[in-house]
Amino acid sequence: MPKPNKPLVGIVLGSVSDRDKMQSAVELLDKLGIPNESVVLSAHRTPEECGEYARTAAERGIMVLIGGAGWSAALPGVLAAHSLLPVIGVPLSSSPLAGKDALYSMIQMPPGVPVATVGIDTARNAAYLAARIIALTDAPVARALSEQREQVRRSIVEPR
């Protein structure tokens, strides 16, 4: 059965300047064959559009949201406030505090509005986590993850 072209992961960037730091998530999802889309929406500068994107994500087929933001990093929390989908936050090191402020913003969410948070500037891990969530109900994604893990294992244990 061919994979649908509809995105399963929505990647939301707080600013156009975050694109380079979030690119590794797109690349890994593409490598695993997981359709995804990237949009730029700000929790503070485009709050209505951000809320609307999160509210309508599930009905458009999105299964997981990834929000990458620096500074106060409210973006993942806003996505989680407007959707029941799993939200993965990627704190970005774009502020004078090198991403620590963003990290604290994401991990200090109030009860009932969780944001799974990866390390500072680790968008690739956010994509791995999204893939694992999708793999729970998608056998081809589970196989792709397993194959990718085996490739990594072999690259470590087999001599070159």
Image: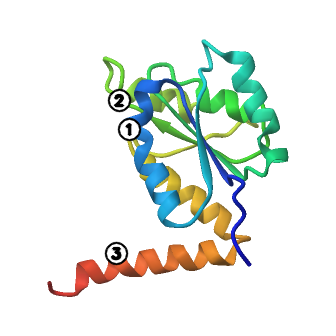
Q: Is residue 10 left or right of residue 120?
A: right
User: Which of label 2 and label 1 is nearer to you?
Assistant: 1
23 or 86: nearer the viewer? 23
Where's residue 25, x and y in %?
A: 47, 50
What residue is shown with label 2?
A: 93
Q: Earlier in the sequence, mark 3 or mark 1?
A: 1
Q: Earlier in the sequence, mark 2 or mark 1?
A: 1
Residue drawn at point x = 41 percent, y = 25 percent:
17
What amino acid is labelled 2 in the image? Ser
What residue is shown with label 3?
A: 152
Q: Where does the C terminus fall, quadrant-wise?
A: bottom left
Where's residue 31, x and y in %?
A: 47, 64
What amino acid is labelled 3 in the image? Val
Q: Earlier in the sequence, mark 2 or mark 3?
A: 2
Please, which residue is most extreme toward the right here? 59
Q: Where does the N terminus fall, quadrant-wise?
A: bottom right
